[in-house]
Image (cartoon, rainbow, N blue to C red):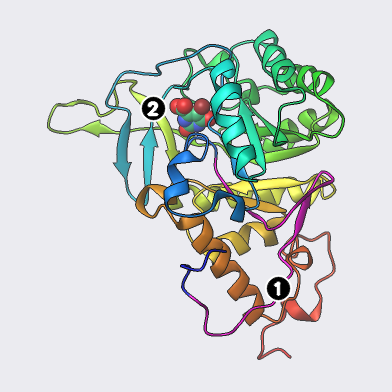
Amino acid sequence: MTSTVARPSVAPAVDLRTTLAGVRFPNPVFTASGCAAAGRELAQFFDVAALGGVVTKSIMVRPRSGRPTPRMAETPSGMLNSIGLQGPGIDAFLEHDLPWLADRGARAVVSIAGGSVEEYVRLATKLRGAPGLAMVEVNISCPNVEDRGQVFAGDSGAAAAVISAVRRQSPAHIPVFAKLSPDVTDIVAIARACVDAGADGLSMVNTLLGMVIDTTTLRPALAGVTGGLSGPAIRPVALRCVWQVAQVLPEVPILGMGGVRTGLDALQFLLAGASAVSVGTAVFGDPRAPVRVLAELEQALAERGIDRVADVIGLATDRLPRPDIARTEEEQ
Ligand code: RRO
């Protein structure tokens, strides 16, 4: 937390540390992939090392200019994006972006995206031994790709093929997380396939495929026609996905995301079974959102008499006994 974060009225003393697949993080609030490139944009607002981790925009093998504009549209309590994997490519990323994060002491969660298993393998190979790399998030769920067949997270077999290849190529001490799409009939089946293929954890969820039509031009608002829906509008869907998977796979660490805007939103994800949360779309309206969410979460836990973040993870699932701290004051 930086000194400019509003001080809470009750001084919290909460142990915020969390662990994802054996990797320790000082707190459970991360950035979300795609909302702040490699973190540089946010450094003018807060110290990126103050967060649990910085999740970078999905990087591909080659530089890519992305989809034509317009590529963003506002929606009720959310936004639609059609960026199309714009980025500098892995070589420039490794030369400029990852060292920048490492120099600042940030824990980098590098998101990778490819159009084929071979591309993911090349990315994982290039990341071996990269400085400051804490985890790899394998984006198999970008909605803005040329054809739906490239949304590997839509099919258990395709998802497993990518994850097992990346896992094989990555050092044992670097967790490999699979980023899942909510746009599936049975997210538990996809989650299980990824875990069986070697995923050390799951990031849930990517954006939902959506569309806006401009009633003045009478045409789709996005040049790419469809886009990924994010923001508070998707929070109940994202939360449901996390909870469903945590119910069935309680031992699998989850990085939860989807419309987290406040500390209480983050708390919901932890209660649903996430060990950490990513704050994404909220940074467009409030670039300090991740550190504010962290301060609010700490305050919310202190107010509930909870000493450790670790004690709330999965409390709202049926797998864990509910301790006294989960009861309301009236009940006690
Ligand atoms: O770049 C994008 O258009 C994009 C990606 Br990679 C993603 O994973 N999710 C999203 O909503 N947009």
Q: Nearer the viewer, residue 272 or 35?
A: 35
The residue at which mark 2 appears reads as: 82
Q: Position of residue 209 (x, y in %)?
A: 46, 31
For the residue with label 2, is its CB less than 8 Å from the closest atom of ligand 1? yes
- As drawn, the label of residue 312 is none
Residue 165 located left or right of residue 216: right
Residue 269 visible here: yes
Residue drawn 65% across the image and 11% down it? 119
Q: Residue at x 60, y 74 (%)?
A: 300
Depth order, front residue of 54/104:
104
Q: Quadrant of residue 177?
A: top right
Density class for disc 2 (Cα within 10 Å; few <14, some 14-19, many ≥20) is: many
Q: Position of residue 58 (x, y in %)?
A: 56, 27
Q: Position of residue 273 (x, y in %)?
A: 72, 55
Foreground: disc 2 or disc 1: 1
Does label 2 or label 1 sit earlier along the sequence? 1
Which residues make up the magenta segment? 7-32
Q: Residues within 10 Å of mark 1 (few under 14, many from 20)?
A: some
Nearest the viewer among 171 and 115 is 171
Taken as a whole, is the magenta stretch helix, strand or loop? loop
Q: Amino acid at mark 1?
A: Val
- The answer to whether the residue labelled 2 contacts the one labelled 1, judged by CB atoms less than 8 Å apart, is no
Q: Is residue 77 above or below residue 299?
A: above
Reading the image, the residue beneath label 1 is 14
Disc 2 residue type (three-letter) = Ser
Q: Is residue 39 left or right of residue 66?
A: right
Label 2 to label 1: alpha-carbon separation:
39 Å
